[in-house]
Image (cartoon, rainbow, N blue to C red):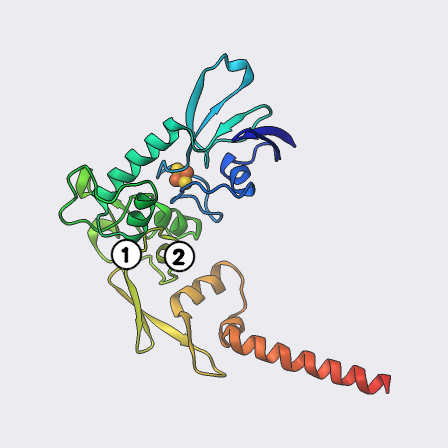
Amino acid sequence: MVHITINGKVVKAHKGEMLIKAIRRQQIDIPALCDHEALEPSGSCRLCMVEITREDWDGWKKLVTSCLYPVEEGLIVSTHSGDVLEVRKTILDLYLARCPQSEVIQQMAEEYGIVKTSYEALPDADNCIMCYACTRACEVLGKSAIAAVNRGRDKKISGPFGEAPPDCIGCLSCAKICPTNVIEWHDENGTRHIWGRTFELISCKECGKKTIAREFADYLIADRDIPAEYFEVCDDCKRADLARKMGGIVDQAKEVAL
Ligand code: FES
């Protein structure tokens, strides 16, 4: 354990943990879009900036991305200093220009008093903030089906050469982790559509409900040693079956007790 000071309060933190975790533990709200517990921190969105200093820094201080900065003994942290707020406002102003239709960005910007961007809004905005959470999630899963293509303002996330990604397995990790909800997908008539690909969905053999993409299940069976039977029944039916079994055990116990 180390001791750090956050907004004037001395608190304990785990040595080496990222500063953002210690800040959140104090119920202090700071904006963060690219940080996710399932991913290694990347420091892409820059929104989690805080100001740090130390007693032995002789008044010197600096701004750091809290999701990427490990805590250390004696650190003094300000999460809402004047400089921090200025930087956050500028970043949100820029995001609002890049993603003018994003409700997530609009709401965050509004919290910092920005209703309209002071920059020129991107005309054909797709609301992607290029935080790479989607590509990182895909990589963690072992597929790396999508990546950034093009340069400058034309940069975007896509399959190879802008085509439907052949390695995509329809798992939805990218869509679910995207902080601005820009990755389009839908399920229709037993199939899933995402990134220009179509995937067959598995039906629960008990209730018929559609569950996950067949290709995703096949991948987990082959690569993660999950038994194929696991995917035959949906989670709801598994829970119902477990409840029935538990009920049976309780009834048996009662009979024994009588
Ligand atoms: S959450 Fe830290 S840089 Fe995005």
Residue 167 seen in render = yes
Q: Work out which residue is located at the far front of the displayed protein and give it.
A: 113
Give residue 115's position: percent from left, percent from top: 24, 45
Give residue 154's position: percent from left, percent from top: 17, 43
Please name the residue that numbered disc 1 is placed on: 165
Name the one closer to the observer, 197 or 79: 79
- Of mark 2 and mark 1, the one earlier in the sequence is 1
Please name the residue that numbered disc 2 is placed on: 173
Residue 42 seen in render = no
**Rendered position, 178 above or below 240:** above
**Rendered position, 229 above or below 183:** below
Name the one closer to the observer, 165 or 244: 244
Q: Work out which residue is located at the far top of the displayed protein and give it.
A: 58
Report the residue at 53% width, 40% height from top.
21
Report the residue at 80% width, 82% height from top.
253
Split into quadrants, the picture shows ligand 1 in the one at top left
- Left or right: 154 as drawn, with respect to 18: left
Looking at numbered disc 1 in the image, what kind of residue is underneath it?
A: Pro
**Quarter holding the C terminus?**
bottom right
- The crowding category of the residue bearing disc 1, from other C-alpha atoms within 10 Å (few below 14, some 14 to 19, many at least 20), is some
Question: Whole-Å distance between the Cαs marked 2 and 1?
Answer: 14 Å
Looking at numbered disc 2 in the image, what kind of residue is underneath it?
A: Ser
Q: Is mark 1 within 8 Å of ligand 1?
A: no
